[in-house]
Image (spheres, rainbow, N blue to C red):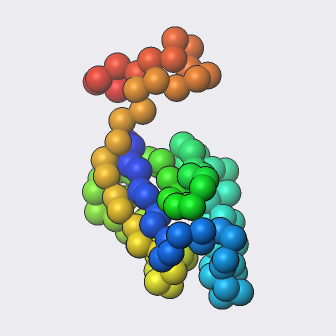
Amino acid sequence: MSEWVYFIHPPRENFAEAMTEAEDEAWGRHFERLKRMLAEGSLVLAGPTLGQVNTGITIFEAPDRAAAERLMAEDPVIAEGFARGELREFRVSLLRGRADGVRSKTE
């Protein structure tokens, strides 16, 4: 299973403070989806950057690029046009809570 990161780029600065009702509803569906992914075990972490630019970061597992692209494209905020997604392959190299904190290059 490969790890992936997608960045969620909102349409304007200070987005979190100035969402419309429709945007707020889409972001609520986005958050519920991330909670389901966490419960199912595919989500590694998710959260927004803070400040004027509220870029979201979602790190997750998917078997290949096509599956990762589908997962990102199905995110409600991206699918409904409230944000733009940017997908990259990712490797978690250090993670608190792992026995030694380190993941080898072959894992």
Farthest top residue in view: 100
Looking at the rendering, in which quadrant would you find the N terminus?
top left
Residue 29 visible at all: no
Which quadrant of the figure has residue 37?
bottom right
Which residue sits at x=66%, y=79%?
19
Which residue sits at x=41%, y=72%?
84
Q: Is residue 45 left or right of residue 11?
A: right
Horizontal and vertical percent for residue 11? 48, 76
Horizontal and vertical percent for residue 93? 40, 26
Residue 100 visible at all: yes
Establish if 15 lies above or below 53.
below
Which residue sits at x=57%, y=45%?
45
Establish if 44 lies above or below 99.
below
Horizontal and vertical percent for residue 31? 66, 64
Establish if 24 lies above or below 6.
below
Establish if 11 lies above or below 99.
below
Horizontal and vertical percent for residue 28? 69, 72
Looking at the rendering, in which quadrant would you find the C terminus?
top left
Which residue sits at x=35%, y=42%?
90
